Amino acid sequence: MTSRLTRAAWLPLLPGLLVVALLAVWTPDPDTEHRFSWRRGGAGEAVSTAEITVRAGVVRLSHALARPERDAVLRSEHVWVAVPVELSARGEQTLGTMSLRTRSGAEFFARTEGGYADPVPPGWTSLQTSLFLVPVDQLPGAELVVVPHGRDVFNHDTGVRIDLALPDAATVRDLAGRTPTLEVAPATQVVS
Amino acid sequence: MTTTAQGLRAWGTVLLALALVVGLVAVAGGWREASSQATAVRAVGEPVRVAQWRLVVTGAALVNYEHGSDYPGPDNELRLLLELTNTTGETLENVPTGLVEVLAADGTLLEARSYLRRTPPWGVGWDPGVPAESMVDVALPQVVGDAPGPGTVHVVVHDQVPARGFLTSPGELAVGAARWRYEVPVADQRLPVVR
């Protein structure tokens, strides 16, 4: 009788242990993996997650970037990519990592030559130009990737991927040849 | 067999095993005097590769001005110039501290005055597969005013190895032992100080 009662007392723990085991399997290792589900779109489209809306405009390409504050022009055999980005914030964790991801998976973070982008407070929209420097052959198929700062407790988050409409190397060379020197306006923020 | 004989035999076995170990270490070269130059020598302009970087030491200069400035300051510094290529799959914002060190001809470590960075007016960060001119300034406190500077310095490049310890992440790297050494001529590029 006593042993039956003891077994019955342990039984309610089993569902809890099962939930813990399932969470352990489902949650990625925070040290090695940050798992994303993606909201995708194209240039000009507004792409939203629960916390942000991102709209990327038409990219400009060039082999030279003006830095008027340094009285310098930065020339490269690679291509400067200027992406106008409108980022509206709803949640607290809005300062995401902005990068250009190539077809091969290489990740180019936004460069600082055009200035640093400030965090976007909830209720505000940032208008900025994200700059990247990328070899010509890596640009076809490239996407703008915006991921949230920080992580949810289970290490699953939602990010934004926007196709930059650079289908092939010929298009990249053509666009880069049209702009002798890129000039980038500083970022501004307006109330949404 | 007596107890004494058994004891002697046991001691003999232990001594024989020790002699065998010492002999093996000797054959492997373990008793040779340690070399103070355990690094491989590279010529200026010759690349070396570590886990995340391809590095080329391209030159060194004795300077008394900030990079890009025309105004000489009171202190002399040694400016080491390198070409760095990030060989990983994503932009890196820092070169690990201690990966590259500059030593005086007598082996004294020269203290860095700045982080190793991309040469201005370039901004922060090394993009994957894009070779980038980079620099670091180190102190030369013994070279005061117009005193002649060192003719050469030694640049030591360390390896990158898997980090060890309980608080490290999988795949984390640490700066390892010195692997390569450059002997770099120093060009005197100081600007005249108007007094």
Image (cartoon, rainbow, N blue to C red):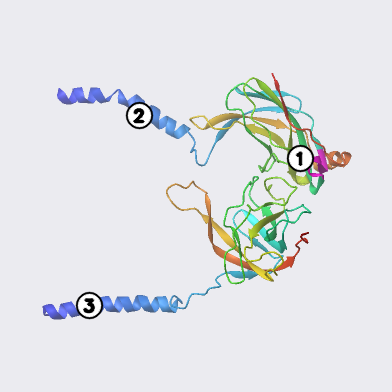
Query: What amino acid does circle 1 point to?
Result: Pro
Residue drawn 57% across the image and 69% down it:
B107
Query: What amino acid does circle 3 point to?
Result: Trp
Return the chain for callout 2: A
Vertical arrangement, residue B97 with respect to residue B44, above or below: above
Q: Quick one: A145 or B78, which is closer to the camera?
A: B78
Is residue B133 something one can see in this rendering? yes
User: Which residue was labeled with disc 1?
Assistant: A140
How far apart in space, not on screen, are marks 3 and 1 (Cα)? 75 Å
Residue A17 circle label: 2
Q: Quadrant of the C terminus of chain B?
A: bottom right
User: Which residue was labeled with disc 3?
Assistant: B11
From the image, state whether disc 2 or disc 3 is nearer to you.
3
Query: What amino acid does circle 2 point to?
Result: Leu
> What is the magenta range?
A61-71
Task: Specify the farthest residue to the left.
Answer: B2
Q: Based on the picture, tell me whether residue A89 belongs to the magenta stretch.
A: no
How far apart in space, not on screen, are marks 2 and 3 (Cα)? 57 Å
Q: Quadrant of residue A163?
A: top right
Residue drawn 41% across the image and 75% down it:
B25
Q: Based on the picture, tell me whether residue A66 belongs to the magenta stretch.
A: yes
Instruction: Compare marks 1 and 2 and give the one earlier in the sequence.
Output: 2
Return the chain for callout 3: B
Local SS, label 2: helix
Q: Residues within 10 Å of mark 1 (few under 14, many from 20)?
A: some
Please indicate whether residue A65 sits to the left or right of residue B1 in the image: right
Residue drawn 69% across the image and 58% down it:
B74
From the image, state whether disc 3 or disc 1 is nearer to you.
3
Residue drawn 42% across the image and 30% down it:
A22
Q: Are marks 1 and 2 on the same chain?
A: yes
Residues tagged 3 and 1 counted as in contact (Cβ below 8 A): no
> What's the magenta bit mostly, secondary-structure-wise?
strand
